[in-house]
Image (cartoon, grey):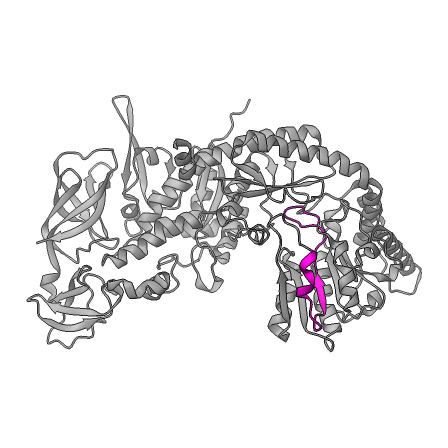
């Protein structure tokens, strides 16, 4: 039974072109980019080539503003902790949104724990978007950094990131945006967004896992977190994951090239899926419907169901989907994002996320829709509250 | 065309019993799917509660070793309602609860079983030491519940609420095995938990002390609940001989921790919630000739007769005692042949009958002890 994969926001398959580009660096071109001899120089060239591709992908003016990391989580940590420690004489206050990925939240929380940083959370609107208008009241002279993601991983809601930075720049406050879920879905423009720091994660857009970048605008004061090597201009020590970096460069090229066409194709499938589910399943609604969303994501609450049961039941029928937390321990704490949007606990527990991508086909989506409709019905049938409701 | 294997959902706690049960079910030829229930909202790994991240990880590794898929299901809201609230409520009423009985009844064999059914599973399997025997009675199949082979580990006591509907869809792979055999099987299969200690405590309370747990659950409301506040200790003649911390914190038959200076040992003989009073007495006053039980379940759907003889077990660690069981409309009266110690309201009375052919006891039914009788 072939699985229908609907969890692209968790991870995506490596594109064949990406794998092909990586292979030489997993075989004969094994050099260390820091080595002075030919085989090392070839590796260095490959890394720098990828760096230039990524710079272009996000509209960075200088490839040196790209720092390769082991992924989005490390890049978020570097942004938050690195910028905080790099500007510690200035201030010790960080503002993040209520819907950030845990890498941002916990990096900030860590600073609070070990160095008494003040961490303030800007609430999210019920629509799922952060409101830029009342932002000024969150900013004080002793604020170092603001971090607001470009696209939310659970709802797919596009945040108005271009609206935040003017106010921040005036006050000398750094602006970081976690753009992990934006890659390949909306155009990333560090200048247009006024971003001083920006995070990308390779495995979300067709590159391998454990590779990502932090964009660091020239002139931004930042401490490295991984000492022990002068790589990445002393900002991130450690021998580069050459093959994965090369792969990510190719993936970025593909994402840029296909952005428009893929968005249209995927939006059609997402809208079909969403439309079918909402019309065939009573007591269901989209989380984040009132805001602008990327084309591939739909987060739907199926009332009177429970997401861990839905995940298992769907998996046994060959559909892979999640409830927003890729945590295998079945974290019973429902999505903090949905709760922050004002959703009651039981509805947050009953919400599922379907995120589409490159390899999904219309036929697959049609089939998946049928399976989901049936599964909701079966899971509801085991809920005494649903039975009660049906009797009313 | 090869017939599709029948699906079995097995509840895996991370302990050695449920892991071996899963392996045995797979060996039988079933398509086994392992499930671990998350029962608590937020569990500190240090607590060692059931469903803690530690147990989850062990269950997953065991499932991997056996070669079956494994999922974690969140039953914490149901568990809170059907087990934890019941547990606290029971103590507030001066009774002594058995949460395992509540969990088996409402969570495992109701909510989990229903979910397994919705997945088209033929059976829900567990690592319980108990046995189901089906018998054809003139064309109709009845499912009988018996003690397990290993009497020292037998858990049929906590399963007395199962009915025909439950039993027809349940599998107990460990029915015929001794615990020692289970452990060596686990070792042979290379399971990660072959030498994991058996859990002795209540799965949602770290350590052995339920008092702080109950107090925490009551939070601010403690002042309004009389049974968690101090009250009088009386002797059997009604004379006050001391003070207690609250009826909720004691159990029938308790001797230690009463804070009394008396010439001979005394035991808690009665807990009276309405007046928040504890009555103590010498050992012989802790014996009762019988009891009344309610909320009865008959495994076969009906009692064998309006009056029948049985061996009745009144707590988990109790040797079943010969008695006569009389069935009334809503309750049952049990008269012991010999008076029994510490008959405790809130605990369950389970009625067994010896089966000569199988050389073990069958669970006929059971109910909750409402009160003891002289």
Which quadrant holds the N terminus of chain B? top right
Q: In the figure, residue A336 lies in which quadrant?
A: bottom right
Q: Residue sitting at 11 percent across and 55 percent down? A: B288
* Magenta stretch: dominant secondary structure: loop
Give, as a single range, the part of the protein colored magenta. A132-158
Percent of width and height locating residue A179: 74, 53
Is residue A342 at least partly visible in the picture?
Answer: yes
Is residue B360 at least partly visible in the picture?
Answer: no
Percent of width and height locating residue A168: 76, 64
Percent of width and height locating residue A160: 73, 52
Q: Residue sitting at 28 percent across and 49 percent down? A: B151
Residue extending furthest left? B237
Q: Is residue A319 above or below residue B62?
A: above
Q: Residue sitting at 80 percent across and 51 percent down? A: A188
Residue A143 among magenta residues: yes
Percent of width and height locating residue A351: 55, 43
Q: Is residue B41 left or right of residue A234?
A: left
Which quadrant holds the C terminus of chain B? bottom left
Q: Nearer the viewer, residue A95 or B315?
A: A95
Q: Is residue B100 above or below residue A114?
A: above
Q: Nearer the viewer, residue A379 or B224?
A: B224
Q: Is residue A221 left or right of residue A107?
A: right
How many marks the image carries: the answer is 0
Q: Nearer the viewer, residue A388 or B298?
A: A388
Residue B63 among magenta residues: no
Q: Nearer the viewer, residue A1 or A138?
A: A138
Q: In the figure, residue B365 lies in which quadrant?
A: top left
Q: Residue sitting at 27 percent across and 55 percent down? A: B90
């Amino acid at each position: 039974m072939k699985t229908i994969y609907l969890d692209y926001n968790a991870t995506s398959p490596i594109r064949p072109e990406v794998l092909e580009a990586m292979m030489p660096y997993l075989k004969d071109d094994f050099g260390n980019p820091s080595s002075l001899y030919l085989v090392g120089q070839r590796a260095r060239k490959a890394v720098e080539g990828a760096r230039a591709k990524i710079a272009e992908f996000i509209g960075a003016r200088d490839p040196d503003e790209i720092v390769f990391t082991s992924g989005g989580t490390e890049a978020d940590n570097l942004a938050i902790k690195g910028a905080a420690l790099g500007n510690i004489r200035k201030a010790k206050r960080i503002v993040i949104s209520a819907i950030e990925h845990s890498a941002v939240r916990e990096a900030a929380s860590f600073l609070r724990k070990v160095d008494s940083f003040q961490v303030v959370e800007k609430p999210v609107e019920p629509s799922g978007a952060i409101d830029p208008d009342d932002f000024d009241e969150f900013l004080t002279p002793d604020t170092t950094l603001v971090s607001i993601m470009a696209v939310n991983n659970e709802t797919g809601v596009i945040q108005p990131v271009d609206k935040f930075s003017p106010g921040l720049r005036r006050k000398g406050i750094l602006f970081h945006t976690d753009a992990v879920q934006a890659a390949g879905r909306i155009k990333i423009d560090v200048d247009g967004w006024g971003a001083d720091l920006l995070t990308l994660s390779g495995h979300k857009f067709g590159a391998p896992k454990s590779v990502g970048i932090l964009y660091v605008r020239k002139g931004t004061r930042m401490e490295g977190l991984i000492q022990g090597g002068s790589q990445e201009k002393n900002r991130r020590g450690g021998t580069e994951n050459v093959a994965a970096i090369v792969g990510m460069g190719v993936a970025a090229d593909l994402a840029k090239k296909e952005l428009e066409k893929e968005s249209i194709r995927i939006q059609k499938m997402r809208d079909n899926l969403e439309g079918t589910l909402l019309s065939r399943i009573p007591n269901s609604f989209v989380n984040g419907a009132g805001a602008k969303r990327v084309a591939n994501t739909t987060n739907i609450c199926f009332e009177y169901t429970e997401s861990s049961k839905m995940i298992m039941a769907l998996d046994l029928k060959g559909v892979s989907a999640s409830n927003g937390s890729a945590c295998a321990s079945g974290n019973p704490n429902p999505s903090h994002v949905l709760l922050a949007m004002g959703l009651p606990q039981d509805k947050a527990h009953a919400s599922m996320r379907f995120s589409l991508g490159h390899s999904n086909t219309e036929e697959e989506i049609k089939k998946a829709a049928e399976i989901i409709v049936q599964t909701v019905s079966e899971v509801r049938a085991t809920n005494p509250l649903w039975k009660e409701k049906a009797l009313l | 065309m090869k017939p599709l294997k029948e699906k079995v959902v097995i509840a895996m706690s991370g302990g050695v019993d449920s892991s071996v049960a899963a392996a045995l079910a797979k060996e039988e030829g079933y398509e086994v799917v392992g499930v671990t229930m998350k029962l608590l909202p937020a569990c500190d790994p240090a607590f060692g509660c059931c469903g803690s991240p530690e147990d989850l990880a062990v269950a997953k590794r065991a499932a991997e070793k056996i070669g079956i898929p494994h999922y974690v299901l969140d039953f914490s809201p149901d568990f809170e309602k059907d087990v934890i609230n019941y547990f606290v409520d029971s103590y507030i009423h001066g009774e002594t609860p058995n949460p395992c009985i509540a969990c088996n009844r409402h969570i495992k064999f109701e909510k989990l079983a229903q979910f397994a059914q919705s997945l088209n599973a033929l059976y829900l399997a567990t690592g319980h030491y108990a046995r189901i025997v089906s018998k054809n009675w003139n064309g109709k199949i009845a499912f009988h519940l018996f003690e397990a082979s290993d009497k020292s580990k037998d858990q049929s006591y906590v399963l007395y609420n199962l009915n025909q509907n439950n039993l027809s869809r349940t599998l107990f792979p460990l029915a015929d095995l001794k615990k020692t055999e289970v452990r060596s099987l686990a070792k042979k299969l290379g399971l990660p938990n072959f030498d994991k200690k058996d859990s002795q405590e209540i799965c949602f309370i770290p350590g052995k002390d339920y008092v702080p747990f109950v107090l925490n659950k009551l939070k601010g409301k403690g002042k309004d609940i009389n049974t968690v506040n101090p009250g009088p200790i009386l002797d059997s003649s009604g004379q006050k001989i001391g003070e207690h911390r609250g009826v909720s914190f004691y159990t029938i038959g308790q001797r230690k921790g009463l804070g009394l200076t008396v010439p001979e040992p005394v035991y808690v003989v009665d807990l009276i919630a309405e007046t928040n009073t504890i009555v103590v007495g010498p050992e012989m006053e802790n014996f009762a000739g019988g009891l009344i039980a309610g909320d009865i379940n008959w495994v076969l759907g009906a009692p064998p007769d309006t009056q029948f003889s049985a061996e009745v077990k009144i707590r988990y660690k109790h040797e079943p005692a010969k008695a006569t069981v009389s069935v009334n409309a809503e309750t049952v009266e049990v008269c012991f042949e010999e008076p029994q110690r510490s008959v405790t309201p809130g605990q369950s009375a389970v009625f067994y009958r010896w089966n000569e052919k199988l050389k073990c006891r069958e669970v006929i039914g059971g109910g909750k002890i409402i009160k003891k009788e002289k």
